[in-house]
Image: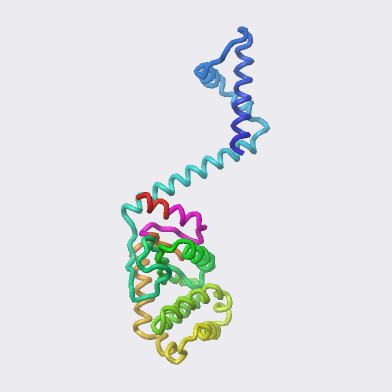
Amino acid sequence: MLRPALSFFLVSTLICCTQLSWAKGPQTVSKKEVRKILKDNPELIFEALQGHEEQLYDLLQIGLKKKNKSRIREGRLKQLKNPKIAALRPDRPVWGTPNGKINIIVFSDFQSATSTKADKVIHALLKKHPNINYRFRHNPLGLHKMSIPAARYYEALAIQSHAKAMKLNRLLLQNRLAINKKGTKILDELARKCEADMAQLHRDLNSAQVNARIEGDRREARKLGLTAAPVFLVNGVTVTGAAPAKEFEEVFAIIREN
């Protein structure tokens, strides 16, 4: 809608200017004269735009969107100079290339609908970009009774096998509604799908190691000032919520440029 609105405005303005000038005879109106005419007669602008309010609204929205996008980019450039750095913790599961140049750490909640949506975006990016390493951390917000139990199952299985835990991670996010409704019964079913040693898993659910990992992640999230879930730290730059892949790509570009 930008070009029609702008074209209409310019044509209307030129017509108005030509009409004002014609009384003196045919002549060329310079930009300086147009500028003076509009400054002295601002009502001409409003008259020219009457009946085209929708186009003007669209034009303003495009301008606001560009301004907001520019503001976000400037904020991320500043953050890249002073990034939020989370511990890598190499003893825990890593998706993608462990030494990849793009490092993404998410602080998430297995019972968050937004986290479920965001997970799909992340795994699509992992397929597209071989230089990403992705790590999952816990930041249950206390809104769902099954957030902590789900986190315990994930961490308990990670003690057995990182590969099995990574598979369970996705299943936990994909089945959050069933987990909320049926509780540990569904958690057990999902763990079995991942070929977990169920006896060992149940022993580890409330172990000191599992508790330390979950509580350690929560403390780190608070220290970093993360109050939502999910929040992604992309080389220390925050991306919050179920952001589209395009937004992550923009952050990747900023990182490459700098």
Q: Residue at x 54, y 65 (%)?
A: 117
Residue that sits furthest to the top in the current view: 24
Q: Residue at x 39, y 67 (%)?
A: 97
**31 left or right of 104 in image:** right
Q: Position of residue 126 (x, y in %)?
A: 47, 65
Q: Position of residue 141 (x, y in %)?
A: 45, 70
Q: Residue at x 35, y 82 (%)?
A: 209
Residue that sits furthest to the front in the current view: 130
Q: On screen, 100 above or below 20?
A: below
Q: Nearer the viewer, residue 39 or 75?
A: 75
Which colour scheme appears in the figure? rainbow
**65 left or right of 50 in image:** left
The magenta segment:
235-251
Q: On screen, 30 above or below 252?
A: above
Residue 10: within the magenta? no
Residue 22, picture quadrant: top right
Q: Nearer the viewer, residue 7 or 109?
A: 7
Residue 250: within the magenta? yes
Q: Residue at x 57, y 82 (%)?
A: 182
Q: Position of residue 138 (x, y in %)?
A: 41, 72
**62 left or right of 101 in image:** right
Residue that sits furthest to the right in the current view: 51
Q: Position of residue 143 (x, y in %)?
A: 49, 71
**135 left or right of 42 in image:** left
Q: On screen, 179 above or below 245?
A: below
Q: On screen, 123 above or below 161?
A: above
Residue 54, picture quadrant: top right
Q: Nearer the viewer, residue 92 or 202?
A: 92
